[in-house]
Image (tube, rainbow, N blue to C red):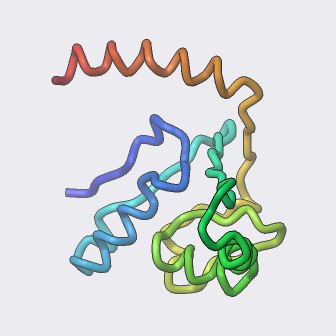
């Protein structure tokens, strides 16, 4: 049996590429059976934010940590650990995880202009989905 992820939701930091990678690490026999895919028309990429919160106990340490995660070395550690995407310009993922990530330079990336509207619309579709599949 071969499993193909249908791409019915955008790739984001906690999406399926990381789960594919982590499951292959647990069960290497899945390597040729489970894959990720993308839309030829374009792929919505959702980023996640990071920040140092006002009133943080150690704001300078937090700022250094954020700077590290944004560096090539920090991005490599994070990407390899989670099989997530880095949006660093010209970034190449570590070889061990690269097969589980789209090469972003080879795909049309589509941004979302109205995040609030999309979130409101998502609620409607999620409710429909839950009615049908729960």
The residue drawn where x is 65% and y is 50% is: 47
The residue drawn where x is 68% and y is 87% is: 73
Question: Residue 83's x, y, as percent?
Answer: 49, 69
Q: Is residue 49 rendered to the left or right of residue 90?
A: left
**Marker count (numbered):** 0
Name the outermost residue toward the right.
Answer: 89
The residue closer to the viewer here, 121 or 55, is 55
Question: Residue 58's x, y, as percent?
Answer: 63, 73
The residue closer to the viewer here, 128 or 1, is 128
Q: Is residue 69 rendered to the left or right of residue 91?
A: left
- Above-or-below relation of 88 to 6: below
The residue closer to the viewer here, 48 or 94, is 48
- Above-or-below relation of 35 to 121: below
Q: Is residue 87 rendered to the left or right of residue 11?
A: right
Name the outermost residue toward the left.
Answer: 134
Dividing the image into 4 quarters, which one contains the N terminus? bottom left
Dividing the image into 4 quarters, which one contains the C terminus? top left
| Quadrant of the image occupied by residue 87 | bottom right
Question: Residue 75's x, y, as percent?
Answer: 65, 77
- Above-or-below relation of 83 to 43: below
Question: Residue 70's x, y, as percent?
Answer: 73, 73
| Quadrant of the image occupied by residue 115 | top right
The residue drawn where x is 42% and y is 17% is: 125
Q: Is residue 10 rendered to the left or right of residue 104?
A: left
């Amino acid at each position: 049996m071969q499993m193909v992820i249908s791409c019915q939701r955008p790739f984001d930091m906690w999406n399926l590429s990381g789960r594919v990678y982590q499951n292959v690490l647990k069960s290497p026999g899945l390597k040729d059976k489970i894959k990720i895919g993308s839309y030829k028309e374009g792929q919505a990429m959702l980023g996640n934010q990071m920040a140092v919160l006002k009133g943080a106990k150690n704001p300078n340490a937090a700022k250094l940590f954020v700077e590290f995660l944004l560096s090539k070395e920090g991005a490599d550690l994070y990407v390899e650990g989670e099989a997530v995407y880095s949006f660093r310009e010209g970034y190449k993922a570590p070889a061990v995880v690269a097969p589980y990530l789209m090469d972003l330079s080879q795909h049309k990336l589509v941004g979302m202009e109205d995040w609030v509207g999309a979130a409101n619309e998502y609620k409607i579709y999620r409710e429909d989905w839950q009615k049908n599949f729960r």
